[in-house]
Image: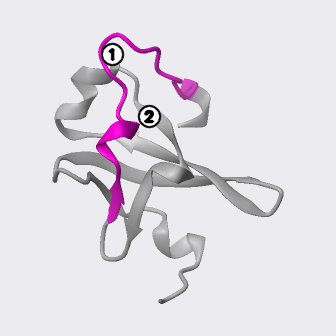
Amino acid sequence: MRVRKISEVIGMKVFTDSGDYFGEVEEANLAENKIDGWRIKVGGSVISMIGGARGVIIPHQFVKAISDVFIISKNALPTQDSEVEEIPEDLI
């Protein structure tokens, strides 16, 4: 297993485990010296699913793999009915 620095992950393309493009990694959220979640700038067809938000925070437990690309579980995707945690404009 290869250990990566967070700086190597920033800017990586994010895909779901079903192969759909989701966006790009913008930042890691840390809590108690551990990665708690990832701020993802949304792109592709996912934008319509989240109601116009530019980005979302995906909890780290939904990350399946980090290698050449960043893969998240499709269960991490918000549905049309669920409430999305939007990132304020000044943070993007």
Protein image colouring: one colour
Q: Which residue lies furthest to the bottom in this view?
A: 1
Q: Which of 86 and 20 is in front in this view?
A: 20
* Left or right of 1 in this view: 71: left
Residue occupying the point 41% across, 15% down? 82
Instruction: Tell me: residue 81, above or below residue 21.
Output: above
Magenta residues, as a range? 70-89
Image coords of residue 6 (percent x, y): 58, 70
**Disc 1 on helix, strand or loop?**
loop
Residue occupying the point 55% across, 29% down? 87
Provide the residue designation for mark 1.
Answer: 51
Instruction: Tell me: residue 88, above or below residue 82.
Output: below
Query: Tag 2: Cα neighbours inside 10 Å, few (<14), some, or many (≥20)?
Result: many
- Report the disc number at residue 3: none
- Secondary structure mostly taken by the magenta-highlighted segment of the chain: loop
Instruction: Tell me: residue 26, above or below residue 64.
Output: above
- Three-letter code for the amino acid on which mark 2 is drawn: Gly
- Three-letter code for the amino acid on which mark 1 is drawn: Gly
The CA span between labels 1 and 2 is 11 Å
- Report the disc number at residue 55: 2
**Disc 2 on helix, strand or loop?**
strand
Query: Tag 1: Cα neighbours inside 10 Å, few (<14), some, or many (≥20)?
Result: few
Tell whether position 1 is magenta: no
Residue occupying the point 17% across, 33% down? 45
When asked about the image quadrant of residue 67, the answer is bottom left
Give the total of numbered labels.
2
Tell whether position 72 is magenta: yes
Image coords of residue 36 (percent x, y): 66, 51
